[in-house]
Amino acid sequence: MSDVSMVVNGRKVSGHVEDRTLLVHYLREHLGMTGTHVGCDTSQCGACVVHMDGKAVKSCSVLAVQASGSEILTIEGLAATADADLHPVQAAFREHHGLQCGFCTPGMIMAATDMIRRHPEGLDEKTVRAELEGNICRCTGYHNIVKAILAASEKMKGMAENKETVAA
Amino acid sequence: MGVEGIGARVARKEDKRFITGGGRYVDDMVVPGMKHAVFVRSPHAHADILGIDVSAAEAMPGVIGVLTGKQIKADGIGNLICGWMIHSKDGSPMNMGAWSPLAVDRVRYAGDAVAIVVAETKGQARDAAEAVEVSYQERDAVTSAVDALKPDAPQLHPEAAGNLIYDWEIGNGPETDAALARAAHITRMHIVNNRLVPNAMEPRAALGVYDKAEDHYTCWTTSQNPHVARLVMSAFYNVAPENKLRVIAPDVGGGFGSKIFIYPEEIVCLWASKRTGVPVKWVADRTESFLTDAHGRDHVTEVQLAFDENHRMIGLKVDTIANFGAYMSLFSSSVPTYLYATLLSGQYNIPAIHANVRAVYTNTAPVDAYRGAGRPEATYLLERTVETAARELGLSPAELRRKNFIREFPHQTPVIMNYDAGDYEASLSAAMQAADWDGFEARRSEAKSRGKLRGIGMSCYIEACGIAPSAAVGSLGAGVGLWESAEVRVNAVGTIEVLTGSHSHGQGHETTFAQLVSERFGVPLDSVSIVHGDTDKVQMGMGTYGSRSGAVGMSAIVKALDKVEAKAKKIAAHLMEADEGDIVIENGELKVAGTDKSVPWFQLALAAYTAHNLPGGMEPGLKETAFYDPSNFTFPAGCYICEVEIDPDTGITDIVQFVAADDFGNIINPMIVEGQVHGGIAQGVGQALLEGAHYDDSSGQLLTASYMDYTMPRADDLPSFQLSHQNTPCPSNPLGIKGCGEAGAIGSPPAVINAITDAIGTNDLQMPATPQKVWATIRSATRH
């Protein structure tokens, strides 16, 4: 058994877990945060993507003890980072019908948010499709997910530019 | 059309919870005292169980109980059944072998459940499952249906001699043989429809809770049809009477057919909860899903299509062997018969058709309905054969199809179906125009200059949805009726709840169904809530599959709305002292036509519940129930065109454009309908290019049991799709809806393979067209 402590969505948490506990199971079973999903056993599907210290990780591939001392952001905390009811990526998924059953959606949105952050210059369809290699969706055929990510990327670019203009 | 009514692209009401992490799936449920289960599964494809020693497992930390097949038998839990009776052509009923929820003396596929371990944590249950000692005597296994029919094949069930479940036929054999005998040309093909694993992203799960004080069970389960699950578990598996069993299917993460069926795990979890005295939760891991979810397709077919000298189709003869796996799943028998062979006429006028289907046991996972269920198999064989025939006859694929299209409706095919409406020319023309068919040869030449092989292929599909008229399917062997139910409850403040027997697991019913109500009464979408998925809340219903929730489920809602409207108008007429026939509903008000008199909707609702001033003899309240039984199937149809570019050095196929032109009848929410088509096409392209469940022939082990081995379509395997609709309203239901859930998966595989075979210049190619297979085919074609 090991002690872990981390910051999840801005809140300090700590616990006592079996050594083999994965981050995703710590979030779901110990903290009751069930927005992060498990869709496979081999780190392929991406339903469990969260941000660890600002970067997207598959939380099925990180032990809870490895995450100890980190800052974790999950789907439940995403909107608050934009200080809005919905983060622009969440809003774009809804507007463009980028989800159906909703199971892959939290991982998709967290991966997409990270993707947009890494491409401040903007995204094109080919890049989005290549970058989504680690996230599987069975419902949408990706068509509207790609549209949603491109739209969110444009919107966030605009927001960043506005912010810079205001700051200047 | 209002901004939120029929035809509006309304963003989905249910999305907010899914995009914020607020979805509630079975694995998210926690009940007091809940413990975790892991199943012990057979590592062998075929073996006798000589003994099971659970003593070491029982002594492991955290273990609450280890239960086996002998105990479940002793407690009187029944075997799993197939609910659709098919008779062989000699009149004998299908040969169904026994399927115990936990195997007792023999296992028949790798993954067959043998025991359940319940422990404090899932990790402890998993550790203990490893410690259950099962002594097996291995038998020879057979995984291919063709091999299983051979005289010396290993035998699975004593009830099914030669592994044959049924030998069934449809159509007119002598007439078809006569057509073949007088044909000017016959196209013959050997068609394999590859076995697929449905792979809903949410793995199957069950949470069984037994309440000893009430002698009552609750089952949370990943189901597309919770009422059917309750019915079957009560009536056939003897879990509990229906009034003592509540089944809840909360948010369900995709189904595609695989969550229609009742599996051993939910039965065993309920039973184990009573046996151990604790709530028992089981969640499949992905490999378990690969091993035990009902697979789809797996047909081997010989087909002959006969033409006269004018290129008219005169006869179609089909001989199919269908792999059923180790046990007959709930609706398995209907898939390669009435959901398959009845669609073999496609969009064409074919006067004589005969199909023979043999269903066969093998040592593989059970096979049942997967998105399209029989209709993709029919469409694939017909559309590949028609395309091949066009090449053999030297005609363009469009010309050959046009010569043979059905153009007058209703049209009675030789294989039961009576097509009620359609315009196949319209979708073909629209697709060809959208794809710039005429400009293709120039694109092919340009690709050739870059060393690439470019090809184009089409597919004209038809399917039968809106399943189904109950008396009709009853006469064909169905064990249930296929109507749907709805209850519309208008609350005293005018908000509305619709209780539907349909179930949404991604289809967006909470939005689409609400749009229907909003349109009818002029109330905001936000005032309408859709309730589904709980047998304690919702009246008996039949669930969601076969693209039936629009055509059948919403028709039931329409019937209930009709009753509500009639009563509301009576009350309004009484309040405004007007004639009932003069009352109209507009913009959320009940008005007396041609006057300025009106009652707002909410006031009318309140009047119904205060009951201070109702027409004489009228019951208070505003709530109506309806059951809708369709009078016919519906017949969505369309044309898909795929254009590919192949690198001859690597065999990699790149889909450069994909066009879909569909006729779904009337559409409530185009955005949601398009999403269904996108997803369907992705699954069809997956079947054509990437996916295939492979068993090792000798050991019977599933070689593709993870996402590292089974190729799921990823974003970079697919293009964006070009969609259009050419809708002819369905005449048989009140909304004119045909259904859209499966079309993409039905129409796309032949379009993709027709494009690839066009590019590489051979008709001999089976799915999935992996780079290795395409490369080898190109190499062998150039060698000849």
Image (spheres, helix red, strand yellow):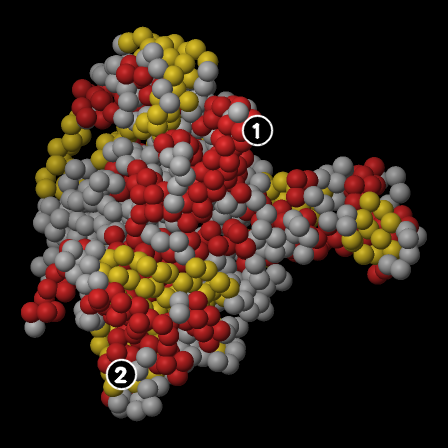
Q: Position of residue A81 (x, y in %)?
A: 49, 23
When the figure is inspected, residue A39 is found, relative to residue B461, above or below; the finding is above
Query: Image quarter for residue B627?
Result: bottom right
When the figure is inspected, residue B88 is found, relative to residue B15, above or below; the finding is below
Name the side, left or right, on which B3 lies relative to B389: right
Type of amino acid under label 1:
Asp
Q: Position of residue B206 (x, y in %)?
A: 39, 33
Q: Position of residue B672 (x, y in %)?
A: 51, 51
Numbered tag placed on residue B615 in the rendering: none
Q: Nearer the viewer, residue B262 or B446?
A: B446
Helix, strand or loop under label 2: loop
Q: For the residues marked 2 and 1, what is the alpha-carbon distance in whole angstroms? A: 61 Å
Any part of residue A144 in sight:
yes
Query: Image quarter for residue B584?
Result: bottom right
Tag 1, which chain? A
Residue at the (12%, 51%) spot, across then down: B697
Q: Nearer the viewer, residue B538 or A109?
A: A109
Q: Residue furthest right?
A: B577
Quarter the C terminus of chain B occupies: bottom left
Per the image, the residue denoted by label 1 is A85
Q: Residues within 10 Å of mark 2 (few under 14, many from 20)?
A: few
Q: Residues within 10 Å of mark 1 (few under 14, many from 20)?
A: few
Type of amino acid under label 2:
Gly
Quarter the N terminus of chain B occupies: bottom right
Q: Residue furthest left?
A: B783
Per the image, the residue denoted by label 2 is B394
Helix, strand or loop under label 1: loop
